[in-house]
Image (cartoon, rainbow, N blue to C red):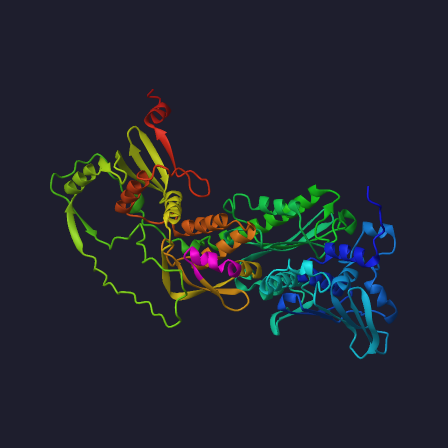
């Protein structure tokens, strides 16, 4: 066995730094937490090149006294705790005394600080754990820390950093989370010389959410304020109609500390059970106030994972708090739509006394009925010309779209008897695409969602959305080159920073799948083309859904990514439950479905149809 050696200081500091300093955003998180603990009311974060070359955090907190400055960069030196019992009731964000020592071990750090009771400030520089300078300096009360050239002395770790835009978005995500967890603190975020975020620090959470996530998110939220067993939960959750495709917009805090908790997520989603679709997730910004002794935050150096002394009260607090908020919002809406007595008009009395003779014999004379013809909708979208993705279109390229004159609807009259004859002719044998003879009769449609078809001695209930979605998916897979259509007007899609990062990273892949996107600003992408199977509706929702799906299922396996994009595009391009379709469209739909016997389930795994035999029906009626 090799001889056991005690590692020198510079080596074990680098090892310890690996647990705390993973990327620029982890440095920003640790330093913002120190600023919050110092009582700062204004915090400015500035980065360049994603934070890999430059990070600056400025606050107006209490500052650091000159005698304590060197201790800041010593491992396990902290002002937050002094004895082991303090670990049982941690009320500050930081307490381990590892962050600044770890940061200074792998980067060049400059600290400028002044305590309130001092006449002048101090500048201290340290790089790779080695002191560079220690001088007096003029500065206001508070602390400024500048971190340069992360991993300058460990180039092997440098290669694991991602693109500047990715690292920058990760930093932005940390600033966002810290801002919404402390709405009483004003945050400014400057990225490559441009201010991209500022919060008021007014203490109004909804105002901070608006500043961070925008109007669309803030308008979709309802307030939560609930107390249970000396605990309190406050914040906001989304309306059931504003769910998301992933959990990326779920933020939980314990006493202002960002946490990850399976218990919290389970309680939140259980509160929305039967209110949102399966596979959709609510948004939330929730802070739980409880006795610090009931939660252990000393689980991991990142201080995000926590353990509860008893998870049941936490689950109940979140579940009932969210449930009551959602129910209260629903009750208010129902009350708003309840008509007053003055709105209910009197109905003539004769309307009640009128009688209908169902057995009255009809006069034996030709009856005619007037219809108004409408231009027939194309249930199956016509494919646009195949687009060549091998090269980028010139900026001056003009797409000419032929104008088709709409045919004015005409009124015509058809005798009822002739209509009945045509209906009888519908029950006939049909030759489908694969040459197989299948006899079917379109019985009708239920709830504008399910087509009812009679085949032999069985009734089929076909979910037209699920079936159409699977058909689109199969057509996507069968295409060697995805057919795309240029949008008449580009669509700007506002995304979260993580979603924006995902879309820009996968821009080439999206292009192969028929989407032409390009970044516009810090969190917006412009969509210029979409697959022809999708059409130009719901472009914003589709891009957001694809971003959330790629973000949730992070993988480098290309076929998996393509599948997820096809799933989303197929769903958005399919006819929706509740959409009105004509009998002609329905018959064409059934013919197409019967020509694809491999279709039994939609891409999400739901059945496309269910069938009931004549025997089962007769059994229910007691005939057999």
* Residue 621 highlighted magenta (yes or no): no
Q: Horizontal placement of 70 versus 172: left or right?
A: right
| Relative depth, front residue between 507 and 590 | 507
Per the image, is 505 magenta?
A: yes
Query: In this rendering, would 292 be left or right of 270?
Result: right
The correct choice, above or below, for 364 with respect to 43 in the image is: above
Residue occupying image coordinates x 69% and y 61%: 155
**Quadrant position of residue 487:** bottom left
Vertical order, 285 against 467 (above or below): below
Can residue 577 be seen? no
Relative depth, front residue between 408 and 455: 455
The quadrant of the picture occupied by the C terminus is top left
Q: Left of 419 or right of it: where is 199?
A: right
Q: Which residues are magenta?
A: 503-516
Quadrant position of the N terminus in the picture? top right
- Against 586, residue 372 (above or below) is below
Which residue reaches farthest top? 624
User: Going 78% across and 71% down the picture, which residue do you hit?
Assistant: 111
Residue at the farthest left position: 365
Q: Nearer the viewer, residue 528 or 159?
A: 159
- Does residue 272 appear in this view? yes
- Residue 140 locus on image (x, y percent): 78, 77
Q: Main secondary structure of the magenta part?
A: helix
**Residue 398, x across and y down, in percent:** 34, 70
């Amino acid at each position: 066995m090799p001889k056991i050696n005690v590692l020198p200081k510079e080596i074990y500091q680098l090892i310890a730094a690996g647990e705390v300093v993973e990327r620029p955003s982890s440095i920003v998180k640790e330093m913002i937490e120190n600023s919050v603990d110092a009582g700062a009311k204004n915090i400015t974060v500035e980065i360049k090149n994603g934070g890999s070359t430059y990070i600056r955090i400025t606050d107006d907190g209490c500052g650091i006294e000159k005698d304590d400055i060197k201790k800041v960069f010593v491992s396990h030196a902290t002002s937050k705790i002094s004895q082991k019992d303090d670990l049982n009731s941690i009320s500050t964000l930081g307490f381990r005394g590892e962050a600044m020592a770890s940061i200074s071990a792998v980067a060049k750090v400059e600290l400028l600080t002044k305590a309130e009771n001092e006449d002048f400030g101090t500048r201290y520089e340290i790089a790779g754990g080695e002191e560079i300078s220690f001088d007096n300096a003029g500065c206001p009360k508070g602390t400024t820390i500048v971190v340069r050239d992360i991993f300058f002395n460990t180039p092997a770790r440098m290669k694991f950093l991602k693109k500047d835009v990715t690292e920058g978005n990760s930093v932005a995500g940390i600033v966002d989370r810290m801002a919404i967890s402390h709405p009483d603190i004003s945050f400014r975020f400057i990225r490559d010389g441009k201010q991209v975020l500022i919060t008021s620090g007014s203490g109004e959470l909804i105002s901070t959410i608006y500043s961070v996530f925008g109007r669309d998110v803030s308008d979709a939220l309802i307030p939560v304020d609930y107390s249970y067993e000396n605990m309190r939960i406050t914040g906001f959750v989304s309306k059931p109609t504003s769910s998301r495709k992933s959990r990326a917009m779920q933020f939980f805090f314990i006493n202002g500390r960002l946490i990850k908790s399976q218990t919290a997520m389970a309680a939140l989603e259980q509160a929305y059970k039967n209110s949102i679709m399966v596979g959709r997730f609510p948004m939330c910004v929730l802070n739980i106030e409880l006795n610090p002794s009931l939660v252990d935050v000393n689980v991991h150096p990142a201080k995000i994972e926590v353990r509860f002394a008893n998870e049941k009260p936490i689950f109940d607090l979140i579940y009932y708090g969210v449930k009551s908020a959602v129910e209260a919002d629903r009750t208010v809406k129902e009350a708003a739509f309840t008509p007053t007595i003055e709105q209910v008009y009197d109905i003539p009395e004769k309307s009640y006394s009128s009688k209908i003779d169902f057995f009255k014999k009809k006069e034996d004379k030709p009856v005619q009925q007037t219809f108004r013809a409408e231009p027939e909708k194309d249930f199956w979208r016509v494919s646009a010309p195949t687009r060549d993705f091998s090269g980028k279109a010139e900026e001056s390229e003009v797409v000419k779209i032929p104008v088709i004159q709409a045919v004015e609807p005409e009124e015509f009259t058809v005798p009822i008897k002739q209509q009945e004859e045509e209906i009888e002719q519908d029950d006939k044998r049909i030759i489908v695409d694969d040459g197989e003879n299948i006899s079917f009769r379109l019985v009708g449609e239920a709830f504008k969602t399910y087509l009812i078809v009679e085949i032999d001695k069985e009734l089929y209930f076909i979910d037209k959305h699920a079936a159409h979605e699977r058909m689109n998916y199969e057509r996507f897979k069968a295409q060697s080159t995805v057919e795309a259509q240029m949008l008449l007007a580009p669509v700007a899609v506002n995304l979260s920073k993580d979603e924006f990062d995902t879309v820009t990273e996968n821009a080439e892949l999206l292009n192969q799948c028929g989407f032409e996107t390009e970044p516009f600003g810090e969190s917006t992408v412009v969509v210029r083309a979409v697959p022809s199977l999708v059409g130009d509706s719901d472009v914003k929702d589709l891009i957001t859904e694809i971003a959330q799906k790629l973000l949730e299922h992070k993988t480098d396996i290309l076929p998996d990514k393509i599948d997820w994009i096809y799933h989303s595009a197929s769903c958005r391009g399919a006819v929706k439950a509740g959409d009105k379709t004509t009998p002609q469209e329905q018959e064409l739909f059934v013919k197409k479905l019967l020509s694809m016997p491999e279709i039994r389930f939609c891409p999400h795994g739901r059945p496309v149809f269910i069938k009931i035999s004549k025997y089962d029906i007769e059994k229910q009626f007691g005939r057999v």
